[in-house]
Amino acid sequence: MKQAIKTDLYASKAPLEWAVVGNGTLYTAQIPIDAQGQVVAGGIEAQTRQTLDNLRHTLEAAGSTLDAVTQVLIYVTDRSYLATVNQLYGDYFKPPYPNRAAVVVAGLAREEMLVELVLYACLS
């Protein structure tokens, strides 16, 4: 059985939940949007920070922390962005780090988005 996690993130008009828990695992995808649903300005650094802040908020709403994250899938629209993502990632995650993969894509759901993270966390 799955359960949606209530967050204070922007209520998307799309048919989605920001996070769902099933069998003790939290599933979430995070993007660089603010409380008004706008993609933040400021390039890859600002967008990565917002995405990670949204993730931290989501985990706290689930009664958890970044330490519970077991896997991260990173999507960026330019290979050069990975250095910045890695730098900020290290500010949020501590050893032992989650397993992860990074993928360079032609584009994301919103044209102005430069980064998106898909994450799995163990809550049990």
Image: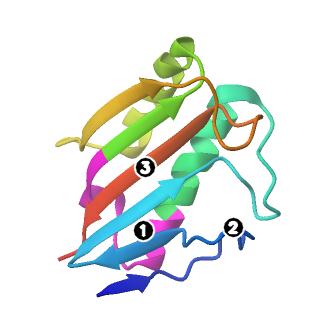
Residue 103's place in the image compared with 7, above or below, is above
| First of labels 3, 1 by sequence position | 1
Residue type indicated by callout 1: Leu
Looking at the image, is mark 1 or mark 2 nearer the viewer?
A: 2
Label 3 close to label 2 by CB (< 8 Å): no
| First of labels 1, 2 by sequence position | 2
The Cα–Cα distance between marks 3 and 2, rounded to whole angstroms, is 17 Å
| First of labels 3, 2 by sequence position | 2
Q: Secondary structure under badge 3?
A: strand
Residue type indicated by callout 3: Val
Looking at the image, is mark 3 or mark 2 nearer the viewer?
A: 2
Which residue shows up at 57% across the image and 58% down it? 54
Q: Quadrant of residue 42?
A: top right
User: Does 84 appear in magenta?
Assistant: no
Residue 116's place in the image compared with 10, above or below, is above
Which residue shows up at 64% across the image and 76% down it? 8
Q: Secondary structure under badge 1?
A: helix
**Which residue is under mark 3?**
118
Q: Secondary structure under badge 2?
A: loop
**Which quadrant is home to the C terminus?**
bottom left
